[in-house]
Amino acid sequence: MTNRLNILIAGGFDPDDPNALVASVDDIVAFGKALGHQVIEQGHNLLTGCQTDLDRVVAEGAAAHPNITDANEKDELRIMSYVLQGKIQSHNIGTIMDSGRKDWDIGGLDASPPEVIQNAHAIVLLGGFYGTFRAANWARLTRVPLLPFFSFGGAAREVYEVETRRFDQAYGDTIPRIEYDQVLKSKSTNWSDLAKDTIQLAEKLATTRSVLVCMSFTEDPKYKDLLAAIKTVCSEFGYEAERIDESNLSKRIVPQILKQVRRAAFVIADVTEEKPNVYYELGFSDGAGKEVVLVAEKDTSLPFNVADIPVIYWPSFEDFKQDLRKRLEEIASFHGRA
């Protein structure tokens, strides 16, 4: 299965000033712990800035999950935090590392983002103050998807307002706007369910809906039927399958092909025929860490370098679609689209 996501949960609350946020401190603490728990529950890694009470609360929620046998176990790296130079860490849970930075300011000599931003696949913002704006700005610069909660107030509410103005540009090809609002503006106090929905939303935002199909360009009708079957099943899980345009094969290394591979949620490759372009795209996809689903016509003799990889066979397209659904259900579940 695809590598785990690194999910940064940032923001903060002032336990001495419960009026600073719209939500009560108790609600934010309860939800923060539920978020940490769900990051681990859904198979991902937690990142924190190790600076605020929220960082501590979220890490405690993650560490309490039964899958974390030892919150300080170094080889798991399920809970990771970076401490800014000269700052006192807010918790000692999981793997704690020194940051190469003294602050999160964007200006100055070093224009590189903080390590937690560099390593994050998605960022959840909860409450927070002025420093939360810095995290949001770094996320935008590095194109890491943001999930700022409106409902809990604080700086995250203002970040949400900005994100909605840029929604079509930033997230429009990934999810509908209503899905974004249903989570980030939710009034639910079922913290466990809301946290589960939040992590699933992070999975969707971190993964595009695009699926790349690599196959022969022959005009044989059976390949048209195959492509139609693939598109039908992909659409059932909210994915959009597209085949590489034949015009892109004008030279061996084509930037457009590599771009399509990089932006794909996963790749489906038909290896019925030993086409150089298919194997080139297959190899690049595997090297890029993409999940690859192999399909082939029944009784195809596969070369040794793919013979040990599970293959979904056709031409019984009804059976093929059923088998493909089972495979895509696993992938979609990881992406929050099941």
Image (cartoon, rainbow, N blue to C red):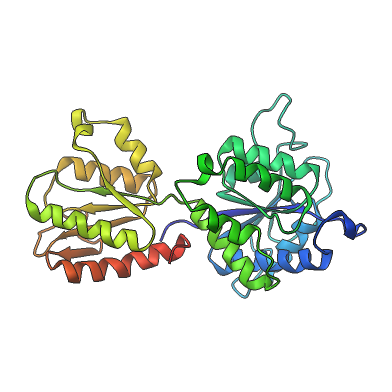
Q: How many marks?
A: 0
> Where does the image place residue 89, in percent across and percent down from the top left?
80, 52
* Outermost residue to the bottom: 66
Q: Residue at x 18, y 70 (%)?
A: 318
Q: Residue at x 65, y 36 (%)?
A: 113
Q: Is residue 154 above or below residue 56?
A: above
> Where does the image place residue 313, in percent across and percent down from the top left?
17, 65
Quarter location, residue 235: bottom left
Q: Quadrant of the C terminus?
A: bottom left
Q: Toward the viewer: 158 or 73?
A: 158
> Where does the image place residue 29, in percent across and percent down from the top left?
78, 65
Quarter location, residue 226: bottom left
In-image side of 92 versus 80 (left or right): right
Q: Is residue 153 above or below residue 102?
A: below
In-image side of 156 versus 275 (left or right): right
Q: Residue at x 9, y 56 (%)?
A: 222
> Where does the image place residue 162, in percent across and percent down from the top left?
66, 41
Quarter location, residue 233: bottom left
Q: Is residue 338 above or below residue 255?
A: below
